[in-house]
Image (cartoon, grey):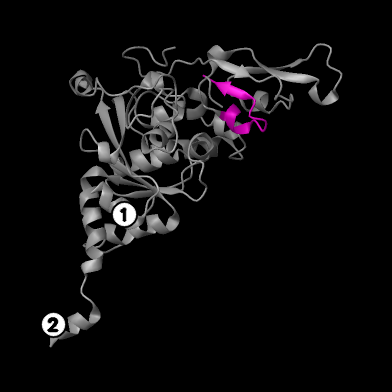
Amino acid sequence: MTDQIVKKLELKYEPVGIYLIPAEHAERYEKFFENFAKPNGRLTYCQAVDTVRGAANYSKLPERPDVLVLKAKDFLCSAGAANLGFYNLPEPIKNGERDFLLRRFPSIETSKVTREMIPHFEAGSTSSVVVFKLSKAPVDPHVVLVFGNPAQILSLEGPYVMKTGGRLEIDVLGTCGVCAEMTVSPLLNRKMNLSTLCGGARSHAFKDPTEMGAGIPGIEFPELVENLLARQNIPKRQDLTKELQ
Amino acid sequence: MEAIKTNSVEFIPGATITIDDDRCIGCKKCVEVCPEDVYELVRRPGETDPNKEFKSVAVAPEKCILCLSCLEICAKDAIYIDGQQ
């Protein structure tokens, strides 16, 4: 399936799978992943994603891993870790002060309201996150992240609603792009979300300014690929006419 | 350095912060943007170049909340947090 989507969309890097280990009964899940690579120093979530897909190696391991297991202590970006449910946001980020000081908003109030609206899991609900190259998936992913240029991401939109029809409503701000918009939002809202990534992701990891991303709930990914490939088999107008005759 | 305590959902601040003295121009942006007052501007002893009179120093790295604002604002890529720019 990975090969098919990479070939069909001519993706530069293959999609990345994400598996979140809940804090409850974490030891049962973590035992399964105990032999997979852990980073040898702090890195941001987006750097972990960029590492496993093969664009760079931020893990500080001698060889770039295809699978990385991250615990709370491994995160360099506290906002990313908090969005993923590892812990509460530090107070200056939560109360809007940090984004206000960065001159992103004209008041702390606006900054706070905006921060509250960023998709996030409950603090303490996540114990570990497993990030992996999709072709090397050790488990079925909760979310699949696809990165590509706008034309490549566009190619996912139609197939996503191919059978039901309708519209895609996108949950986006350009803040916490890979963690909140591409990972948390698809899980909370149970639908594909698109992201133009964020300043942090582009500063710390994703260096190609033409790239954007789509986060797809893992359970929907096989059908999306199926629909993507099925498009070429949709009857032509001439064939429909023959059928109608 | 542990970011959180076992069974805690509260973030525990603290990071290893290094500033590249050669790159830092003492523009004070990291001082202004840091919500936890991790940085202070200090005078470089004996410096005669007016453009390099001051430099930033991480005086309270134990208060760092890993918001990475300083990395975002530093135009000279002079700041490293846990070894990363």
User: Is residue B70 magenta-colored?
Assistant: yes
Q: Amino acid at mark 1?
A: Lys
Residue A166 is situated, as x and y percent measured from the top left of the image, at 29, 63
Q: Report if residue A58 is visible in the image.
A: yes
Circle 1: is it few (<14), some (14-19), or many (20+) Cα within 10 Å? few
Q: Which residue is mark 1?
A: A7
Residue depicted at 42% across the width and 25% down the height: A59
Left/right of residue A12 with respect to residue A8 in the rendered view = right
Q: Report if residue B37 is visible in the image.
A: no
Report the front residue among A223 and B13. Answer: A223
Report the front residue among A5 and A17. Answer: A5
Left/right of residue B44 with respect to residue B11 in the rendered view = right
Q: Do badges 1 and 2 share one subunit?
A: yes
Query: Which region shows up in magenta?
Result: B69-82
User: Quick one: which residue is furthest to the right in this view?
Assistant: B48
Which label sits on residue A132?
A: none
State the separation of the CA atoms marked 1 and 2. 32 Å
Q: Which residue is mark 2?
A: A243
Residue depicted at 25% across the width and 21% down the height: A35
User: Is residue A202 magenta-colored?
Assistant: no
The local secondary structure at tag 1 comes to helix
Residue B57 is situated, as x and y percent measured from the top left of the image, at 67, 16
Residue depicted at 66% across the width and 23% down the height: B31
Q: Quadrant of residue A132?
A: top left
Left/right of residue A94 with respect to residue A28 in the rendered view = right
Residue A130 is situated, as x and y percent measured from the top left of the image, at 30, 30
Residue A157 is situated, as x and y percent measured from the top left of the image, at 33, 58
